[in-house]
Amino acid sequence: MYVSSRAVRLSQGRERPLTVHHLNQLLLVCSIVLLVAVVAVRISSRSGLPSLLVYLGIGIGIGQDGIGDIHFDNAELTQVIGYAALVVILAEGGLGTKWTEVRPILPSAATLALTGVAVSVGVTASAAHFLVGLEWRQALIIGAVVSSTDAAAVFSVLRKIPLPSRVTGTLEAESGFNDAPVVILVVAFSSAGPVEHWYVLVGEIALELAIGAAIGLAVGWLGAWGLRHVALPASGLYPIAVMAIAVVAYAAGALAHGSGFLAVYLASMLLGNAKLPHWPATRGFAEGLGWIAQIGMFVLLGLLVTPHELGDDIVPALVIGLALTMVARPLSVVFCLLPFRVPWQEQTLMSWAGLRGAVPIILATIPMVQGVAGSERIFNIVFVLVVVYTLVQGPTLPWLARKLRLGADSAADLGIESAPLERLRGHLLSVAIPAGSRMHGVEVAELRLPAGAAVTLVVRDGTSFVPLPSTVLRRGDELLVVATDPVRDAAERRLRAVGRGGKLAGWLGAGGPQAGH
C-alpha cells in the first residue's frame, strides 16, 4: 500500500481515490498501531529503552522495508504534522512545569537555550565540515538541527528520575525554550540565498523571540483570568479550553512573525501555574494528547525513513554525534553555566542529558521541503544520530545520576482538584493523598487549615465518612475540603506544605524538612 496526501496506491500499482472503505482500512491500521504503541510503553518503561525509539521502530516495521510495505515519502506532510505534534508536546510540557522550580533557574536555562545553541551549532558544524567533509551549508544545517534538545524526550525521561529541582527545571526549561531559535536558524540556513551579515540574523532571532514571548505571556494571562472567572457548564470543557488557549498562543505568535513555539510554551506554563478549576482532569487530558502526538509523530518519522539507504551515512552520523555529545554539549553547558556557579556534578549530568528526539528529525525535513542539495543525506545522518545516541544516553541517565549522587528523596506531591462553587463564593477541593506523601499519619486538626476552610469528607477504601479533628489521615485517602474564595489559595498552599513536610510544616519552613529541594 502506498500512502500519500492525494491517493492510496495498492500493491499492484493502481491508484484509486480515497473512499469510505479505504478510510475504514486506514482507521483500522491507525488503531492497531496506537494499541501496539500503548503496550510498548510498558515494555520500554521496564527495559529502560526510550519510548521514542520503540515508536520509530513501529514506523520502520510497517514501512516499505518492513512487514507493512507502506511507502511514505511526503516530507512536507510530515513537517506539518510534526509541527502540530510539537505544539501539543510543548503545551503538555509547559502545563507540567512548576514556576517555583523554573523561576530560580530561568537565567541559566535561557542562556543555555540561546548562547548554548550558538556554541553547539559552531562546534558541530565544524566537525561535520572538517571531519566528515560536508559543505558548509549542509554542515551548518546539521549543526543547527541537532543543537535543540527534544522536549518530548527530556520531559518523558527526567520526570522518572528523582533529581534536584534545579537540574530538572533547567533541563526542562531549556528544552522548552531552545526549539524557537533553532527553528529560525534551520529555516535561515535552508533558504535559497546565502546568510549575509550574521548580526542581522541575530537581530531577527531576538525580534521573533521577543514577539513570541510577549504574545505567549499575554495569551496565557488572559486565558487563565478568563477560566478563573467564567464557570463552564461541564468539567470536561476546561481541558479543551486550556489546550485551545495554548494553540491560540502558537498560532498568534506565528502569524505575528514571532516564535510560535516559545509562545505556546510560555502560555502553557502560565496556565499550568494559575490554579485553574479541575486541574488534575486538565493535566490528564493534556498528557493523553501528548502521548498521542508523540506516538503519531515518531511512527510517521519511522515511515518516512528508508532503512536500506542508511548504510553510507552511519559512520558520518556517529562522528558528528560524538562531536556533539562529547565536545559541543559539554562545552556549551560549561560556558553558559560558569557565571551561575553550578556544581560540577550537575554540569556533568546536564551535559549528558542533552537528549535528542523527534524535533531534530522534524527539523531535518525543512531542507528537504526547501529543496536543499543533499537534504536526503542530512535527514539520514540526523535520523541515525538521534537513534544511536538516544539509545546510549537515555538508559544511562539514572545510572549517572546515582554515580554523581544527585538523587533527590522528595515527598510525592498531592493531587488537588478545584471545583468553583459560584453561588456560595467558595471552592470544593478534592485532595488525593499519594503513597509518598508525608500527610500520612497527620490528624485533621494538625492540618491547621486557615479559617474559612475545613475538611468535610474523607473517602477511604471506598467508604466515605465525616472526619473528626482527631481522625488520622492515611495514604490513599481522598479528602473533600470546602474553602471560601478569599482563603482558597492559602488552603491549597497549606495542604501542599503538609504533604511535603508533614505535621511540622510551617515550623520547619513552608515546605517542611524538604523545603530546600
Image: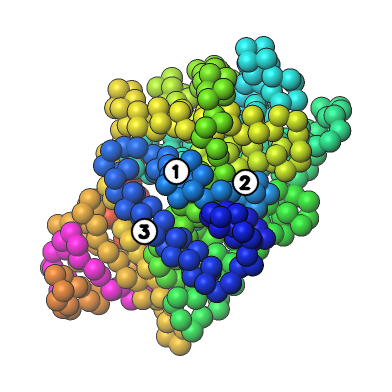
Q: Amino acid at mark 2?
A: Asp
Residue found at x 48% / y 25%: 351
**Extreme residue toward the top, this view:** 130
Does residue 176 appear in the picture of this structure?
no
Residue found at x 30% / y 22%: 403
Q: Circle 1 is placed at which residue position?
A: 66
Residue 406 x %, y %: 33, 29
Secondary structure of the residue carrying numbered label 2 = loop
Q: Is 482 contained in the magenta span?
A: yes
Determine crowd level at label 1: few under 14, some 14-19, many 20+ residues with C-alpha closer than 10 A. some
Is the Cβ of the residue at disc 1 closer than 8 Å to that at disc 2? no
Query: In the rendered image of this protein, does residue 223 appear above or below residue 287?
Result: below
Does residue 139 appear in the picture of this structure?
yes
Q: Nearer the viewer, mark 1 or mark 3?
A: 1
Residue 35's tag is 3
The residues bearing labels 1 and 2 have C-alpha atoms spaced at a distance of 15 Å
Is the Cβ of the residue at disc 1 closer than 8 Å to that at disc 3? no
Secondary structure of the residue carrying numbered label 1 = loop
Q: Amino acid at mark 1?
A: Gly
Residue 516 x %, y %: 36, 39
Residue 73's tag is 2
Determine crowd level at label 2: few under 14, some 14-19, many 20+ residues with C-alpha closer than 10 A. some
Q: Is 180 contained in the magenta span?
A: no
Residue 321's tag is none
